[in-house]
Image: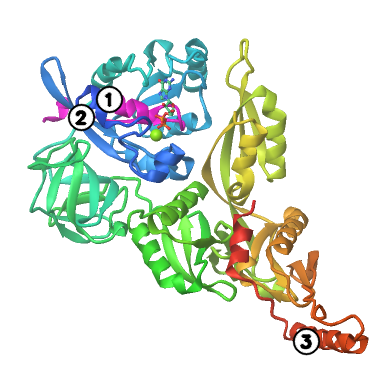
């Protein structure tokens, strides 16, 4: 296939607007998959169980289709992108392998927060954008209104919009035709030195890492000796082929083609998304825009049964092999024993990993409160901290920390006008700044849509922000964000003391304005989950030397006199006396037994 017979494209959309459904229709129409292969709600491209359950695409997956236009077979490469804000960076990478994108919008929901973010990514990459309105079969569909929204938001010409129902298949032919007519073919040279863009990787238990590449120039063949521009590591190509949608080996990958390469990479971390592969001895300029994925949310993962650690660590490592954006380090805690500290792209990424760990590895685990990477600015250096225990007890002269900074994001929320006040309030209580808003449409008949933009600390988003956004807008608000650097902030370490002793695994980093509420909330939770001891246990939240909140866990009083007859007062007194001594002794020894189960309850209570 020469370049002019190839189209590389992607479908970009807000979650649930029908990306997977449209992908399935395209694969069916082109005969790539048979109709009956699809179960009721199981999309072919969403392979992971957790993705199916949550209805999201986590891992980008790609398929090549062959379709005949004007008597000539064409290759259409669909590059699937992940559908969540945590993976915005992966979206951007995958789009680098395309020349065009279908911008899919639900005709009943209209433009949503992620519609805007993915549009901007595609536009920055200079892609040809084909606007598509989906779900026009729904009674609630308002194609004219949404077309007007797209015109005012993106400058879309309403005549360019294709109206479809991915569910019934109506209009999908027209989409195929538009892909051929409107998206430019890739351009590359067969005779130029090999240059292949690595945009995704898969992990195969038997063959190791499989990279997905878009060949820019030259030919990639079995037996070739290739090298990575970024790691300089060398490999021999074992197999190349296309995803159809399963892997099908081919003789070679030519300019403009998209396919897979198996070349004995042992670990996913070797397959850098955005890397450029070239032939050994024929170096090329790497494609621009390479940036390693950066963890933005960290949490400790510990086994409920401490003797399970070796098994848990093995499971975590195996799972991390399939997802190169997770970082893994060992961590040990006095309270929880041996565990791992993992870094994720965002909270959804964390939830997905955790669920996969539980589903696929049958692991019973405790996940500590998530934390973002904080920056401590010293006179001559910056130190990034991903664990509250590393945070200085007090930020003062003795700590030599000049300033504490936290990551912030630019957030956008799209919501019907009726919920605007609630959303403003939500933003304010989560320390948002620079609030701005504008109308997306006038809302004829129904409530108008408002877009709200602000700058908000990432730490505010990793806790309850998303849940509150959904509940306070009755599910109507959509939300997306992009990283926006670091900002100075008034943060301190909060520790929790049981009987005067700090519990390391419970330390948190909190903003001054939240100290009281967080301190009170956590001691209340703690008093509920810690089993009673033989003596009274004070539970305190402290920042530096200051106690912020306190609850008291009542003593468990074993009725040691139950077996004694009423008359033996003297003996009864003696027994109670002895019990009191015992309690005092235990209290002096001071240790409160905090079982793993209590942690489990604590971390899973909302
Ligand atoms: P994705 O998150 O963008 O991949 O969205 P999905 O393809 O998973 O679709 C989300 C939901 O919308 C699913 O329940 C689909 O069955 C439904 N859906 C997708 N396209 C259409 C359509 O054209 N009409 C109707 N009525 N429902 C659709
Ligand atoms: Mg999907």
Task: Give the mark nearest the N terminus, 1 or 2.
Answer: 1
At numbered mark 3, what does the secondary structure look like: helix, strand or loop?
helix
Front residue (pair 5, 365) = 365
The picture places residue 524, in percent across and down from the top left corner, at 75, 59
Q: Which of the numbered marks, if any, corresponds to residue 32?
A: 2
The picture places residue 182, in percent across and down from the top left corner, at 28, 19
Asked if 520 appears above or below 568 in the picture, the reply is above
Q: Are marks 1 and 2 in contact (CB under 8 Å)?
A: yes
> Could you give the CA–CA distance between mark 2 and mark 3, rounded to whole angstroms?
76 Å
The picture places residue 491, in percent across and down from the top left corner, at 68, 59
Give the crowd class for mark 2: few <14, some 14-19, many >=20 residues within 10 Å: some
Q: Is residue 274 left or right of residue 551?
A: left
At numbered mark 1, what does the secondary structure look like: helix, strand or loop?
helix
- Point 30% across, 57% down: residue: 268
Say which residue label 1 marks. 26
Say which residue label 3 marks. 582
Give the magenta-colored segment's residue range.
1-27
Q: Quadrant of the N terminus?
A: top left
- Point 60% across, 68% down: residue: 505
């Amino acid at each position: 296939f020469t370049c002019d017979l190839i189209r590389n494209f992607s479908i970009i959309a807000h979650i649930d607007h029908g990306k997977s459904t449209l992908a399935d229709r395209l694969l069916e129409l082109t005969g790539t998959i048979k109709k009956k292969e699809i179960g009721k709600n199981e999309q072919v491209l969403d392979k992971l169980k957790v993705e199916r359950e949550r209805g999201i695409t986590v891992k980008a997956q790609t398929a090549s289709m062959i379709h005949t236009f004007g008597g000539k077979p064409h290759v259409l490469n669909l590059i699937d992108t992940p559908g969540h804000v945590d993976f915005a960076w992966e979206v951007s990478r995958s789009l680098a392998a395309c020349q065009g994108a279908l911008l899919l919008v639900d005709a009943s929901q209209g433009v949503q927060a992620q519609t805007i973010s993915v549009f901007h990514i595609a536009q920055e990459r200079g892609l040809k954008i084909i606007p598509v309105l989906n779900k026009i079969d729904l009674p609630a569909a308002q194609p004219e209104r949404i077309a007007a929204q797209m015109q005012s938001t993106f400058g879309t010409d309403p005549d360019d919009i294709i109206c479809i129902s991915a569910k019934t298949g109506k209009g999908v032919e027209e989409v195929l035709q538009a892909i051929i007519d409107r998206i430019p073919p890739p351009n590359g040279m067969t005779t130029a030195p090999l240059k292949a863009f690595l945009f995704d990787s898969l992990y195969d238990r038997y063959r190791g890492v499989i990279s997905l590449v878009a060949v820019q120039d030259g030919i990639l063949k079995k037996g070739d000796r290739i090298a990575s521009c970024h790691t300089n590591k060398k490999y021999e190509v074992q197999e190349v082929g296309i995803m159809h949608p399963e892997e099908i080996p081919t003789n070679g990958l030519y300019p403009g083609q998209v396919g897979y390469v198996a070349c004995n990479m042992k670990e996913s971390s070797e397959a850098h998304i955005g890397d450029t592969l070239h032939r050994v001895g024929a170096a090329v300029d790497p494609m621009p825009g390479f940036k390693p994925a950066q963890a933005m949310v960290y949490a400790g993962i510990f086994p409920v049964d401490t003797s399970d650690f070796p098994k848990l660590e093995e499971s975590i490592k195996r799972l991390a092999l399939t997802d190169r954006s997770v970082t893994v380090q060992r961590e040990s805690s006095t309270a929880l024993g041996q565990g791992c500290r993992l870094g994720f792209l965002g909270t959804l990424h964390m939830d997905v990993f955790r669920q996969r760990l539980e589903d696929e590895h049958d692991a019973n685990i405790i996940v500590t409160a998530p934390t973002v990477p904080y920056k401590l600015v010293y006179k001559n250096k910056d130190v990034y901290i991903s664990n509250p225990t590393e945070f200085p007890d007090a930020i003062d002269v003795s700590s030599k920390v000049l300033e504490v900074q936290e990551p912030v994001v630019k957030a956008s929320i799209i919501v019907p006008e009726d919920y605007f006040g609630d959303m403003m309030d939500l933003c304010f209580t989560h320390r948002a700044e620079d609030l701005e808003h504008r109308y997306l449409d006038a809302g004829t008949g129904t409530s108008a849509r408002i877009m709200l933009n602000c700058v908000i600390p990432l730490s505010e988003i990793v806790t309850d922000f998303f849940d509150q956004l959904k509940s306070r807008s009755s599910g109507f608000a959509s939300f997306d964000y992009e990283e926006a650097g670091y900002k100075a902030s008034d943060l301190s370490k909060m520790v929790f003391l049981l009987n005067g002793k700090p519990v390391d695994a419970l330390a948190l980093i909190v903003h001054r304005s939240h100290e009281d509420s967080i301190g009170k909330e956590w001691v209340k939770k703690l008093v509920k989950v810690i089993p009673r001891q033989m003596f009274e246990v004070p539970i305190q939240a402290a920042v530096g030397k200051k106690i912020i909140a306190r609850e008291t866990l009542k003593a468990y009083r074993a009725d040691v006199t139950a077996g004694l007859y009423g008359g033996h007062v003297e003996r009864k007194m003696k027994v109670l006396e002895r019990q009191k001594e015992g309690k005092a002794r235990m209290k002096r020894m001071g240790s409160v037994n905090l079982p793993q189960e209590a942690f489990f309850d604590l971390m899973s209570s909302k």
